[in-house]
Image: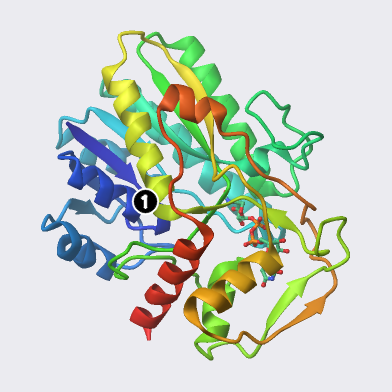
Amino acid sequence: MNILVTGGLGYIGSHTVVELIENNYEVIIIDNLSNSELFILDNIKKITGVKPKFYNEDLLDLNKTNEVINKHDIDGVIHFAAFKSVSESIKYPLKYYRNNLLSLINILRSMDENNISNIVFSSSCTVYGQPDKLPVSENAPFKKAESPYSKSKQISEQIIEDFVNSNDNISSISLRYFNPVGAHDSGMIGELPIGIPDNLVPYITQTAAGIRDELSVFGNDYNTSDGTAIRDYIHVVDLAKAHLMAIKRLNNSKKKNIFEFFNVGKGTGFSVMDVINSFEKINNIKLKYSFKDRRDGDIEEIYSDVTKSKNILKWQAEKNLDDMMSSAWKWQKYLK
Ligand code: WQD
């Protein structure tokens, strides 16, 4: 089976490529290196013994996308390629809408023109906004998106739904990620934030490495057990395995024209302090941090109901918070 992975050198993409190769899939990567680095391709080879076919192309160029797809007999697509910084999307909304929506439209057009049926789409728990009920399940409504990034994911899911409804030959599964953290056990692939990290865990590891002076904890006045905000952190390797189950489900399904979406989280909520305490304990490191005001756009609490993923996707997360924190630190030390 040949799987095209867009954004396959990125954080979640590269971990998914490793899982696909280790399950005997042929992987073809399209990545424009806007948020990834080429050494990840070499490290995928070091981990798996296989160097996947790689094309440094931008999905915004439909002709180039078609040229790549025409070179291979593609059985399915996993579409990661998108910008994903919440704060940057607030500063540059048009950049986010153009890139994230046009890339998706082009890959769907190219699938249609090349008779490729199956797509797994990288969606996000941010499509829910601040849910009324927790844990949040897939039938929760899309509430007001907190950022253009989140809105681009809401719109993307709707584009896919409309396209599946218009075309009997297309099937899709959208995976709504919660908070992916950690790194591959090898310590050779992981998150590569550009500049100052937006996200909690890379900021923690860079503080521990002395790259940042101190971690700011954004808000300790939330209505939670320790006052800090709660998220559903999931190990990136568990998340990668969910993509394997999704592409398998599409490739093995007798039913055509599938349109499904699943929560992909641990199914538990951890506060910022839980994460800090786990990092300090498992790595035997004292972290420098101080409490600051809440960050704009942050919600108080979210964690997933993963019943549907367990029952239908036959997937559930296995790694715990300590695994996430020890693997994140191992990767940071590799980057030194
Ligand atoms: C987590 C918590 C912060 C940084 C992310 C992705 C988004 C989506 C969901 C996939 C919050 C606090 C953070 C720091 C802090 N994933 N924090 N100090 O905002 O939940 O969103 O996951 O689509 O793309 O961005 O994750 O890691 O930024 O924040 O206190 O320096 O950590 O306030 O409570 P978030 P995050």
Q: Is residue 96 in sight in this rendering?
A: yes
Relative to 28, say whether 188 is above or below.
below
Rendered location of residue 31, percent (x, y)? 33, 53
Residue under pointer 1: 13
Which one is in front, 94 or 297? 297
Q: Is residue 232 left or right of residue 235?
A: right
Quadrant location of the N terminus? top left
Q: Is residue 199 left or right of residue 9?
A: right
Which one is in front, 19 or 324? 324
Quadrant location of the C terminus? bottom left
Rendered location of residue 22, percent (x, y)? 19, 47
User: In percent of the image, x 34 and y 23: which residue is there?
Assistant: 249
- Tag 1: amino acid: Gly
Colour convention of the picture: rainbow
Which one is in front, 72 or 8? 8
User: In percent of the image, x 40 and y 38: which residue is there?
Assistant: 242
